């Protein structure tokens, strides 16, 4: 998947009409490059998984992603009172030479996000290698946000920003990374 002016792969889970239904996706063994990597932060992403008032489970495994605004971006937002759930496994990917973050997981509003980032090579990106965080502005319901993360066995090198940064609502596991 290459030379596109939008996202390489975009998964959008929106309000489930059937109670308890989970959208399940596997993105495995793709090569994604040249998704107009000089564009803005939320556009032209290598892989973008977005849960909007839905239950989404996604495995993003064994992909090579380069020259995007952000390599892999998992994001959750809930504009109503029902909440959302996003469970993401990001494993075995080579995320490199992107114009922004390598891997970013962002809990934006009123939801539950669990991200496991395991066994990736994240290198030479123009911002943080790995960023897992939540919206902490006063306009959002911080008591209605849950974000947990595990960073295990990743190689994170040569990024312009921090290697890995986390702002979660519960203790995170950061084990055996280099």
Image (tube, rainbow, N blue to C red):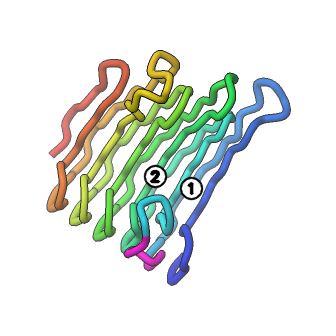
Which class describes the residues within 10 Å of circle 1: few (<14), some (14-19), or many (20+)?
some
Q: Using the image as rendered, state which of residue 85 and residue 30 is in the foreground.
A: 85
Q: Give residue 144's mark.
A: none
Residue 29 in picture, x, y percent from top left: 50, 63
Identify the residue at image location x=32%, y=52%.
120
Secondary structure category for the residue under label 1: strand
Side of 79 relative to 119 (left or right)? right
Q: Give residue 73's mark.
A: 2
Q: Quadrant of residue 6?
A: bottom right
What stretch of residues is rendered in magenta? 34-39
Per the image, is 36 magenta?
A: yes
Per the image, is 103 magenta?
A: no
> Relative to 137, does residue 106 appear above or below in the rendering?
below
Identify the residue at image location x=69%, y=35%.
54
Q: Which residue is the site of mark 1?
A: 27
What is the magenta segment's predominant secondary structure?
A: loop
């Amino acid at each position: 998947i290459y030379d596109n002016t939008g996202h390489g792969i975009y998964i959008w889970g929106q309000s489930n009409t059937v109670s308890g239904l989970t959208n399940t996706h596997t993105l495995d063994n793709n090569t994604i490059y040249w998704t107009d990597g000089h564009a803005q932060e939320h556009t032209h992403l290598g892989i973008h998984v977005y849960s909007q008032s839905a239950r989404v489970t996604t495995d993003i495994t064994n992909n090579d992603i380069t020259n995007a605004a952000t390599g892999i971006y998992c994001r959750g937002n809930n504009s109503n009172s029902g909440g959302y759930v996003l469970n993401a496994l990001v494993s075995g990917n080579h995320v490199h030479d992107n114009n922004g973050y390598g891997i970013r997981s962002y809990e934006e509003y009123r939801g539950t996000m669990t991200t496991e980032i395991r066994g990736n090579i994240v290198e030479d990106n123009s911002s943080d290698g790995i960023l897992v965080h939540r919206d902490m502005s006063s306009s959002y319901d911080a008591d209605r946000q849950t974000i947990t993360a595990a960073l295990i066995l990743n190689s994170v090198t040569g990024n312009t920003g921090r290697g890995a940064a986390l702002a979660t609502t519960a203790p995170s596991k950061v084990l055996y990374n280099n």
